[in-house]
Structures are given as C-alpha cells and as structure tokens.
Amino acid sequence: MKQKMKKHNKIILLTALPGLAMFLFFIILPFLTSARYSLLNDVYHKEFIGFGNFGNVIRNSRFRLAFVNSFRFAVVGVALLLLVATALALAIHRLKRRTGLLRVLLAMPVLVPTAGIVLAWHKVFRQMYYYDLMRSPVLGDFWYVLPIYLIYLWKYSGLCMLVLLAALDRIPDDFYEAAKLDGASRGVCIRRISLPLMRPNLLLVLMYAFMSSLKIFKESYLYYGETKYPEDIAYTLQYYMNNQFLKMNYPTLAVATILFTAVIALIVFVLYRAEGRFSEVLD
C-alpha cells in the first residue's frame, strides 16, 4: 500500500513539474528581476540607491491618483458584480427547467474578443444623449467612467452566475420544502439556506471578480482611444505602469509592480481569513 502511495505521489510530482517550471521561469524570476531593478537608480548606470524609488513613487501624485481609482473600481465593481451575478443565479435557478440556452447566452460575453466588446459599447455611449448626461451635475465625473463599469459587469457577470448556479444546483430541494413547511418565506430561504451553502462558490466568484477588475485595462485603453492620460477619474494603476514602461523608467515600473502585488496579496489574505471566520460562525 505504501509503495503504491509513493508511486502515486511521484506521478503527481512529475505531472506538476512542467507547470512549476513555467511558474518559476515566467513569474518568479521576472518578479525577482523587478525587485532588483527597484533598488537601482536606472537600468543604464545601475547605481544602488536602496528604497529611494519606493519613497518617490509613493509621493508621486499620479501614482496615488491611480491607486485610489483602481481601489475604487475594485470595490464598487466587485460589489456590483456579486449582486448582479447572485441575482441572476437565484432567478434562473427558480426557473428550474429549460434554462440551458439562457445560461449559455449570459456567459457568452466573456468569450467575445475585447475589441468587439469595446466597439459595441463605444457606439452605445457615443450618442448625443450621453454627452448631455456627462454635462449633468448629477454624479459629476462618474459619467465619464460609467461605460467601463458597465463593460465590466456585462463581460463577467454571466460566468460568475454559472459558478453560483453550480452551487445552487447542488442544494437538495428537500431543504427548501422543509423550510416552507415551517412557514419560511423565499427571502428567508435565500438568507438561511442558499447563501450559506453557496459560500465556497461566493468566495471563488469574489476572487475571480477582484482579479478581473484588475484586468479591465484593455477595455479602458481601447474605449478612451489609446490615450496615455484619460480623465483623472479613469486613470488607474495600469495606465501609470504602462506609461512608465513607455518612458523606459523601469525602476519606477518595478516599484509600482511590487506595491501592486503586495496590495493584491494582502487583499487575498484578508478575503481568505474573512471566509474562514464566516465559515466558523455558520458552523
């Protein structure tokens, strides 16, 4: 038995080695190189200046603006995506039958090429009525960045809905029937049965939505006409890092990358800790 387990573990290790090698070569080594660049004054003289670049980047007003905008988009966008995906999942799950085509159609946007998505939404928001809304004092500058939020929701809500539907489909109907016999309303069933049993999938959707919010740069870059500096409210960390790359300011780019990675790691850690405590409370 032990020999079989050892052989099985060796097979698993050998199967994982190519993926681990690619992760080391394409992720870890470039990140370590970036860490080295962050301690140099530039890539030509390569003089060691310690953590001076970190202070310069943190004090930079454009970096702080980009960080605040990225954080705002992640918080607001992810919250809206979770609400939309959860509502769609609950609504479709209630239909029970003949929802296969509807599920496919709602998940299709994530497969559409980015250029096609941006072109379609660009035509929608390049109408005169939207220019009138942008001049309205209601919501202020948010009208300028609203299309990016809608593109994000439209693109990713369907796939997140499918993940949540998978959790709902695993819940036995007996749970709901027993609750209804006790006089529970639909809202109580959702709050006491559906959402608690969906929590592993909700965490997965939350992580996916957060990562997707950081990858919306392509859509933003194409929508605003490939400009290096859109309006301040739409200027995110990806714009900042892209501009540093074009200027060949690699130490600053390396510092921004390290800070960005550190913030992402911290948020992921907090989410996992929060999910663990939430699970303990429910259990």
Image (cartoon, rainbow, N blue to C red):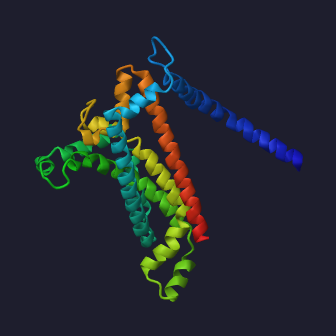
Residue beneath the point at 59% across and 60% down:
276
Looking at the image, residue 134 sits to the left or right of residue 252; the answer is: left
User: What residue is rendered at 26% in x and 46% in y?
Assistant: 145
The location of residue 100, given as percent across then percent down, is 44, 61
Task: Identify the residue at horizontal 58%, vertical 70% (top origin).
Answer: 282
Which of 5 and 264 lies nearest the eye of the viewer? 264
Q: In this rendering, is residue 134 above or below 50?
A: below
Whole-percent x and y of residue 245? 39, 24
Q: Is residue 156 above or below residue 166?
A: above
Residue 98 seen in the figure: no
Judged from this view, the residue extending furthest toward the bottom is: 182
Residue 240, image x, y percentages: 35, 32
Q: Is residue 226 above or below residue 184?
A: above
Q: Residue at x 23, y 49 (%)?
A: 142
Q: Nearer the viewer, residue 93 or 74?
A: 74
Q: Work out which residue is located at the far top of the displayed protein and give it.
A: 45
Determine which quarter of the picture holds residue 36.
top right
Question: Do we see residue 66 in this rendering?
Answer: yes
